[in-house]
Structure formats: structure tokens, C-alpha cells
């Protein structure tokens, strides 16, 4: 039976293994153990894991800047896809954001990852074509 729990820093190794095995999910230095621990501490009760028989089969990071929510790195093991687990994990993040009074949430997917886009659109998310994402990284920083 699959159960959902808050994501704890102690879950990092198992979650990282899932993320690394998930096609279309891009990992960077910002996904290091220390960076994820800081993210979890900064955004308590907004990130979750799913376990089946003790094994991590799903994970999601959720956070906020105080105005908007952000959902990142949702991953479900292939053995557990198309059973509503991804939607349940996303809903947990949205519920957590709602308790903070945050009603708008963003997520980013790679343009070429059509399967992910289809999942999110089926789940009620809207593709935005009125904005362009720009990024800046401090080349001297180690956790960009």
C-alpha cells in the first residue's frame, strides 16, 4: 500500500535515486544534499515522498516565495505511474500552499518532455505562452 509522508532530509538518497532514474528530470548543483535540506527547511510541510512497502516510489518538492507557489521535481517510479500518485503528490503541495494563503502555483517542464506536459494539462494546469523565463546564475556560487 502506498503511503505519503513529508519529505525529510534523511530521504535524500532514495529520492535522488528516483530523480536520477526519471527521464526528463534535470538535476543540477541546486539539487545537492545541502541545497535540498535548506529548501526543505525554508519550505516546511510542502514537499512529500510516497513509499510502497518502505521503498520510495514518488517524490515532489514544493515551495513558496511568499506570493506564489512552486512545484518541482515531481517523479513517480514507472511501476506506480497512471495510478493517481503523481496527482496526489501535487495535490498535497497545493493543499499545503493553500493553508498558507497561496492560491497560485507554477512549475517548469522541459519543452521537449511532451509526456510531462500532457500529464500536467490533464491535471488542470495551464500552459503559459505570455511569459518568457529568464535565469541568472552567479558563476562563483556553488549552489546555483
Image: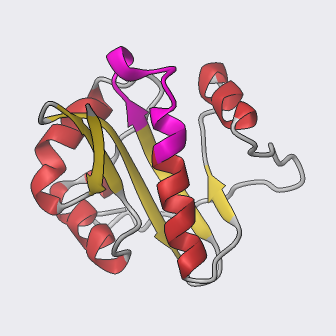
Q: Is residue 135 left or right of residue 49?
A: right
In the image, is residue 60 part of the stretch drawn in magenta? Answer: no
Please report the residue visible at 28 percent of the width from the left and 43 percent of the height from the top: 3
Q: Tell which residue pokes out farthest to the right in this image.
A: 130
Among the 4 quarters of the image, the one containing residue 77: top left
Of residues 138 and 12, the one nearer the viewer is: 12
| Image position, residue 96 (x, y; %) | 49, 69
Q: Quadrant of the C terminus?
A: bottom left
Of residues 43 and 89, the one nearer the viewer is: 89
| Image position, residue 38 (x, y; %) | 25, 72
Of residues 51 and 15, the one nearer the viewer is: 51
Among the 4 quarters of the image, the one containing residue 142: bottom left
Among the 4 quarters of the image, the one containing residue 56: top left
Q: Can residue 89 be seen in this view?
A: yes
Q: What stretch is highlighted in magenta?
A: 75-88
| Image position, residue 81 (x, y; %) | 45, 21
Q: Tell which residue pokes out farthest to the front in this image.
A: 1
Q: In this view, does 126 lie to the left or right of 89?
A: right
Please report the residue visible at 55 percent of the width from the left and 72 percent of the height from the top: 97
Q: In this view, does 103 lie above or below 129?
A: below
Q: Is residue 29 visible?
A: no
| Image position, residue 54 (x, y; %) | 12, 36
Please report the residue visible at 57 percent of the width from the left and 61 percent of the height from the top: 94
In the image, is residue 82 part of the stretch drawn in magenta? Answer: yes
Q: Quadrant of the N terminus?
A: top left
Amino acid at each position: 500500500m502506498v503511503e505519503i509522508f513529508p519529505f525529510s532530509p534523511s530521504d535524500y538518497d532514495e529520492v535522488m535515486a528516483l530523480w536520477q532514474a526519471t527521464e526528463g528530470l534535470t538535476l543540477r548543483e541546486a539539487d545537492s544534499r545541502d541545497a535540498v535540506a535548506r529548501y526543505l527547511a525554508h519550505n516546511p510541510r510542502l514537499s512529500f515522498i510516497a513509499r510502497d512497502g518502505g521503498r520510495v516510489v514518488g517524490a515532489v518538492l514544493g515551495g513558496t516565495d511568499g506570493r506564489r507557489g512552486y512545484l518541482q521535481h515531481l517523479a513517480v517510479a514507472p511501476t506506480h505511474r497512471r495510478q493517481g500518485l503523481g496527482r496526489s503528490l501535487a495535490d498535497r503541495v497545493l493543499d499545503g500552499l493553500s493553508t498558507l494563503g497561496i492560491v497560485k502555483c507554477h512549475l517548469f517542464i522541459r519543452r521537449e518532455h511532451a509526456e510531462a506536459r500532457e500529464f500536467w494539462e490533464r491535471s488542470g494546469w495551464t500552459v503559459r505562452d505570455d511569459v518568457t523565463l529568464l535565469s541568472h546564475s552567479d558563476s562563483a556560487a556553488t549552489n546555483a
